[in-house]
Image (cartoon, helix red, strand yellow):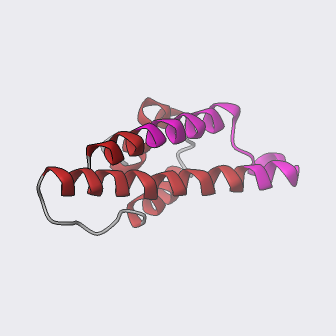
Amino acid sequence: MHSAYPALFATLGDAIERVPPDVAPALELALAAAAPPPRPSGPPAAARTRAGLAAARLRCVIELLHAAECARAGSRQGDQLSDGAREGLLLAGCCLTEHITRGIAAF
């Protein structure tokens, strides 16, 4: 599943294994669409690009968590993410936030 969904794997890491197979393609498209355009190369520019990509992916994770909460609040059991998937998204958000912080410190 890792090679089929590179943006999703970059966001969730090993938690990708808990993403339902019917949801993974849509998540991959959303994450790939959130990627910022490439910028000039060099250490500061590369750090900005990585931080920008992480920020775009963090926004996507937050939107997914919001959608999961709306489904939970609507109490439609079949539309809810599992606890493991929610935990994976929260962990991804924390990791992306740390990545952004390190990227900002680099420039």
On the image, the x and y values in percent for residue 105 come to 32, 43
Name above or below for residue 102 compared with residue 42.
Answer: above
Q: How many marks?
A: 0
> Is any part of residue 76 visible from this angle?
no
Provide the residue span drawn in magenta. Answer: 69-98
Where does the image place residue 81, in percent across and percent down from the top left? 69, 43
Front-most of residues 18 and 102:
102
- Farthest residue to the left: give it: 42
In this rendering, would 30 be left or right of 79? left
Question: Residue sitting at 57 percent across and 40 percent down?
Answer: 89
Q: Position of residue 12 (x, y in %)?
A: 46, 39
The quarter of the picture where residue 36 lies is: bottom left
Q: Magenta segment: does it hold 75?
A: yes
Above or below 87: residue 65: below
- From what the image shows, is residue 51 above or below residue 95? below
Question: Relative to residue 73, is residue 22 drawn left or right?
Answer: left
* Residue 102 placement: quadrant: top left
Q: Nearer the viewer, residue 28 or 40?
A: 40
Residue occupying the far bottom of the picture: 37
At which x and y percent is residue 79?
A: 75, 51
Task: Examine the structure image and report whether residue 3 is included in the region drawn in magenta.
Answer: no
| Quarter of the image with the N terminus in it | top left
At a point 36% along the width and 57% down the height, the residue shown is 52
Q: Main secondary structure of the magenta part?
A: helix
Residue 57 visible (yes or no): yes
What residue do we see at 41% from left, 66% from top? Answer: 33
Q: As drawn, is 84 to the left or to the right of 32? A: right
Q: Residue at x 50, y 39 (%)?
A: 92
